[in-house]
Amino acid sequence: MKRLFLAAALAAVMLLPASSASASLTGEYARFSKCPFTNTSVLLCIYAESSSGSFTIGSKTVPIKTPVVLQGGLGGSEGILGPMNLFAATDGVTLSKSPQPVPGGLLGVTAPTWWPSILRELFNETINNGFTGVTATVELAGPASGVSLNVLHALEGNGTAFVFPVKVKLDNPFLGGSCYIGSNSNPIKLNLTTGTTSPPAPNIPISGNPGELEEPVLGVISLKHNRLVDNSFAAPGVNGCGGLLFSWAVDPFVNSILGVPSAAGTNTATLEGTTYLGNAEILAGL
C-alpha cells in the first residue's frame, strides 16, 4: 500500500503537462538552471545539496563542512519509477568541487627514513613551513552517466537509491595536484540508501532517512532533511601522490597514514541535506 501511495504521489506531481506552467526559472525553479531539460531523454532535473554528514575511509573521518551539490538531469527506459541515469549539468559542474578539511592533516607526521634524502628534505621543509593542512574533495569517477538514481527507492527508504562511483582528491603542497584515493578505472563504489544497510563486519547496520516530501511549486518535489548512507563499500589505495617523480615512495606512505586500501565493512559515507526533483518537460516550457 505504501509503495502504491508513493508512486501515485510522485506521478501526480511530476507528470503534469508543460502547458500548465507559467513561471520562469526564478525562485524555486532557479536551482534547475544547469539541468539539460531540453534534452528529450531527460525526464527529471535534480539538485541535491549535502550540507552535513561525513566520510570515513580507512582510519580517517572527514566531516562535510562545505556543502556538496549534485545537479543535472535524469532519464531511463523505465520512466520516473525505475532506475535513471544522470545527465551532466550544462556547465559541466555536475558535482561541485567542495574541499573538506581533513582533521589532523599531516600534523605530527615525519618523513620515512627509507625515503631518498631529497624527498625527506622536501617533505620536512613543507611541514616546517606550516603546510600541514590537507583537504579532501569528492569527485565523480568517470562520466555523469555512471551515476544512477531510483526515486521510488529513495522515497520508500528501501533498496539502493543512488549508485555513485567517486574518487577523492587529496590536496596539500607536498602531495601535489594529482593525489587521489581511487580513480576512474578503480573507483569508490557507493550504493547509497535512505533505508538500512547490511554491511559486512566489523561495521553494523546504519539507517538513512527519505526526508520530508514536499511540493514547493508546480512540477517540483523536495525531500528535505534526507539522509543517504552506505557502510558496505571498499576503498582502494591512493595514486599519484607526490607527482610522477615521487609517487612510488609517497603513495605507500599516504596509504599507511590513511589506512587504505580498506576492505568493505570498514568505511562509511553519510550525506545529509535536501534533494529537489523537477519535471523536465515543465522546466523546458517556462
Image (cartoon, grey):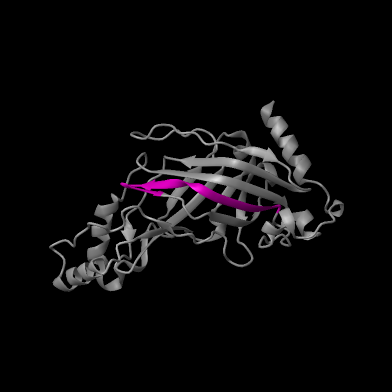
Q: Report the number of discs.
A: 0
Name the side, left or right, on which 146 lies relative to 19. left
Name the side, left or right, on which 105 lies relative to 232. left
The residue lying at 32 percent from left, 55 percent from top is 237
From what the image shows, is residue 147 above or below residue 179? above
Q: Position of residue 142 (x, y in %)?
A: 49, 60
Q: Position of residue 244 (x, y in %)?
A: 30, 72
Residue 205 part of the magenta segment: no
Q: Give the residue at the far right of this rendering.
A: 19
The residue lying at 52 percent from left, 47 percent from top is 163
Name the side, left or right, on which 73 lies relative to 283. left
The residue lying at 54 percent from left, 34 percent from top is 195
Res. 41 image quadrant: bottom right
Per the picture, the main secondary structure of the magenta-coloured stretch is strand
From what the image shows, is residue 200 above or below residue 145? above
Q: Position of residue 265 (x, y in %)?
A: 36, 39
From what the image shows, is residue 245 above or below residue 227? below
Res. 104 image quadrant: bottom left
Q: Looking at the rendering, in which quadrant would you find the N terminus?
A: top right
The residue lying at 13 percent from left, 63 percent from top is 114
Res. 202 image quadrant: top left
Q: Position of residue 173 (x, y in %)?
A: 32, 69
Residue 52 part of the magenta segment: yes
In magenta, the rendered stretch is 43-62
Q: Looking at the rendering, in which quadrant would you find the C terminus?
A: bottom right
